[in-house]
């Protein structure tokens, strides 16, 4: 009896192993037959079944893209597990993906359904990852209206001026001529700016950073009310610093949850601990932003109580939160929106995060690259100085107006040329909702497309002498010959960056504020730009010093 059981068990075991091996071999065979017999196969490394291509898992994915581009050209594919990633580095191949239409667009989304983003509640509201098309369209229209409203843009110009004065004050206190890291200052500057522009609240990011210098002195006597905070309330400053860090965490958390498989988040202890920590920090921020939204709502309602019905332009600032909330309480709006449906506070809260997160890193890094290039091209700098002098003459302190900023064309062209050569966002993400065909290649629904902005903007098919730094290519009639979708620093199509106009305006203003008053000098002109390439090219350090002209 025992020997019968043994035989039976070993026979069964043999069968199971056998079946598994046969099954696996069949899977591998079918996988490669399908792979090699695909009609018009895209070039790319041959994937391993189930795993895909090892290179696709590199954190520094732009390095992989660079290597693959050299080997396979402008249109190639790589596999991550069973996900097909298609990289595009030529403008004409990206036409369908950059369709500007809100409706009838097969490429409206950046990601397919994603459990991690769902867990963070990001796929059903907001702008960046929202998978509810109608909801996204409504939000995008609001955002576009607010960001294009001259009232909002004028107020942004004013906030930029005020914050620049504050930053100058700190530099003067620290001693002009000392070495400063522009990357850190600009990150803080943009955090303060974005917070005020979106919520009308000050977060003291610059002040907190200034306080980290050993020789900082807090003698704020300029009557702006900050002295009270500076002198009396370490608690406010600590809270605001926590907020600055939590905003960064929110974005890192979104990327972590988007890219980390659910089973790893649950079963792998370091990732499980990380998920828990990130969710708790994001939860804290959620509460703070919720309070902020409620606080501003109450303030606005108070203003309404004292007035009959309509808002006086003078009484409400044109910050984004106010604009969205005034829409919510069904009075006249400060935007041009007609027949708008009120937005839920949850929705508003998410948009506030996304705008804060979307504007800080991008603009601060772009500005660092701008200064780097200007300082390396004296002939361009000279031409820029002429334009600035023409606008302001010797009057280096008077406020810069929105209208003046719109007049300067050479400064505009410098920003564009820098963002062509050193794009801050190197790749755009899209997925197709329905099966499609591009250049004769067929794509299943939910194929992941990556538009390689860095390569498109350096592609000889679109640009003459692409390596050359030449802002004149964007001047006057030269600009007319720029091929559609070959210049994408702010992305394109229906998903184009809503902050484009604001960012351009602000970078121009900062260039003028810097250069009309100060001589700017890089500490080590021979050093290459120190940056880390990821979803955003992050400038790590740009040491500079300034002195009064
Ligand atoms: C130099 C500064 C900036 C650069 C280079 C930049 C670049 C980009 C890029 C490349 C995209 C993706 C577009 C696409 O997928 O086609 C994007 C999206 C976005 N940006 Fe910006 N941006 C900048 C400033 C800003 C500012 C100042 C804000 C807001 C205050 C902002 C808010 C957003 C938002 C909310 C999105 C998502 C739009 C959507 O998915 O519908 N950005 N940006």
Image (cartoon, helix red, strand yellow):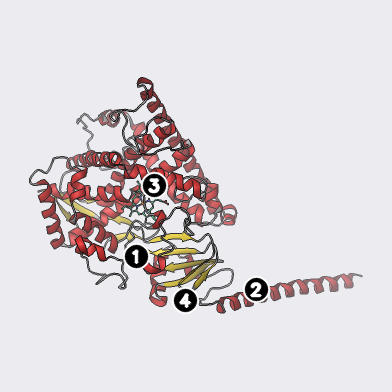
> Helix or strand or loop: what does disc 1 sit on?
helix
Residues marked 2 and 4 touching at CB (< 8 Å): no
Mark 4, residue position: 43
Instruction: Tell me: is circle 3 under 8 Å from ligand 1.
Output: yes
Mark 1, residue position: 454
Ranked by sequence position, the earlier of labels 4 and 1 is 4
> Helix or strand or loop: what does disc 4 sit on?
loop
Of all residues, the one furthest to the top in this rendering is 306
Residues marked 2 and 1 touching at CB (< 8 Å): no
Inter-mark Cα distance, 1 to 3? 22 Å
Examine the rendered structure and indicate whether residue 163 appears above or below residue 98. above
- Location of residue 39 in the rendering, given as x and y in whole percent from the top left corner: 54, 77
Q: Nearer the viewer, residue 312 or 280?
A: 312
Inter-mark Cα distance, 2 to 1? 37 Å
Instruction: Tell me: is circle 1 under 8 Å from ligand 1.
Output: no
Ranked by sequence position, the earlier of labels 2 and 1 is 2
Residues marked 4 and 1 touching at CB (< 8 Å): no
- Location of residue 12 in the rendering, given as x and y in whole percent from the top left corner: 80, 71
Q: Nearer the viewer, residue 295 or 187?
A: 295
> Residue 27, which numbered label?
2
- Location of residue 330 in the rendering, given as x and y in whole percent from the top left corner: 43, 31
> Residue 357, which numbered label?
3
Examine the rendered structure and indicate whether residue 156 appears above or below residue 35. above
Q: Nearer the viewer, mark 3 or mark 4?
A: 4
Of all residues, the one furthest to the left in this rendering is 394
Ranked by sequence position, the earlier of labels 3 and 4 is 4
Q: Nearer the viewer, mark 2 or mark 4?
A: 4
> Helix or strand or loop: what does disc 2 sit on?
helix
The quarter of the picture where residue 161 lies is top left
The structure residue drawn at horizontal position 44% and vertical position 44%, both measured from the top left corner, is 139
Q: Residues within 10 Å of mark 1 (few under 14, many from 20)?
A: many
Ranked by sequence position, the earlier of labels 2 and 4 is 2
């Amino acid at each position: 009896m025992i020997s019968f059981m043994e035989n039976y068990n070993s026979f069964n075991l043999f069968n199971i192993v056998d079946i598994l091996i046969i099954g696996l071999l069949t899977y591998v065979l079918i996988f490669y037959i399908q792979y090699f017999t695909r009609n018009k196969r895209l070039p790319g490394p041959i994937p391993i079944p189930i795993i895909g291509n090892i290179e696709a898992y590199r954190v520094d994915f732009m390095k992989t893209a660079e290597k693959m581009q050299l080997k396979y050209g402008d249109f190639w594919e790589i596999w991550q597990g069973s996900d097909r990633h298609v990289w595009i580095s030529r403008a004409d191949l990206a036409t369908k993906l950059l369709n500007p239409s809100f409706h009838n667009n097969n490429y409206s989304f950046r990601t397919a359904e994603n459990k991690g983003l769902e867990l963070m509640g990001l796929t059903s509201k907001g702008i960046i990852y929202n998978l509810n098309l109608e909801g996204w369209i409504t939000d995008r229209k609001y955002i576009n209206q607010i960001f294009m409203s001259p009232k909002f843009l004028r107020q942004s110009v004013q906030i930029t001026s005020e914050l620049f004065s504050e930053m100058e004050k700190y530099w003067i206190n620290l001693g002009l001529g000392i070495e400063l890291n522009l990357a850190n200052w600009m990150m803080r500057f943009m955090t303060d700016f974005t917070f005020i522009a979106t919520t009308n609240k000050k977060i003291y990011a610059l002040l907190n950073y200034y306080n980290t210098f050993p020789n900082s002195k807090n003698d704020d006597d300029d009557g702006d009310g900050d002295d009270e905070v500076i002198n009396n309330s370490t608690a406010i400053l600590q809270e605001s610093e926590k907020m600055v860090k939590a905003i960064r965490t929110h974005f890192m958390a979104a990327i972590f949850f988007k890219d980390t498989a659910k089973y790893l988040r649950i079963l792998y202890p370091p990732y499980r601990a990380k998920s828990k920590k990130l969710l708790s920090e994001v939860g804290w921020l959620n509460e703070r932003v919720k309070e902020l939204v409620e606080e501003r709502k109450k303030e606005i309602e108070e203003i309404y109580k004292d007035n009959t019905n309509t808002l006086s332009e003078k009484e409400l600032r044109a910050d984004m939160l106010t604009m969205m909330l005034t829409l919510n309480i069904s009075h006249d709006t400060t935007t041009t929106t007609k027949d708008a449906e009120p937005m839920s506070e949850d929705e508003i809260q998410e948009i506030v995060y996304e705008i804060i997160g979307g504007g800080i890193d991008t603009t601060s890094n772009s500005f660092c690259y701008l200064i780097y290039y200007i300082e390396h091209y004296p002939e361009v700098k000279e031409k820029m100085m002429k334009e600035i002098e023409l606008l302001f003459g010797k009057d280096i302190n008077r406020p810069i107006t929105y209208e003046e900023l719109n007049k300067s064309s050479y400064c505009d062209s410098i920003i564009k040329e820098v963002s062509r050569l050193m794009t801050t966002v190197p790749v755009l993400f899209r997925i197709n909702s329905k099966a499609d065909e591009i250049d004769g290649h067929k794509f299943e629904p939910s194929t992941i497309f990556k538009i390689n902005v860095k390569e498109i903007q350096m592609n000889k098919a679109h640009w003459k002498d692409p390596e050359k730094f030449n802002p004149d290519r964007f001047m006057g009639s030269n600009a007319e010959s720029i091929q559609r979708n070959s210049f994408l620093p702010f992305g394109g199509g229906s998903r184009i960056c809503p902050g484009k106009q604001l960012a351009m305006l602000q970078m121009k203003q900062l260039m003028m504020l810097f250069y009309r008053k100060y001589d700017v000098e890089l500490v080590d002109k021979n050093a290459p730009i120190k940056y880390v390439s990821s979803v955003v090219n992050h400038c790590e350090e740009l040491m500079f010093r300034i002195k009064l002209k």
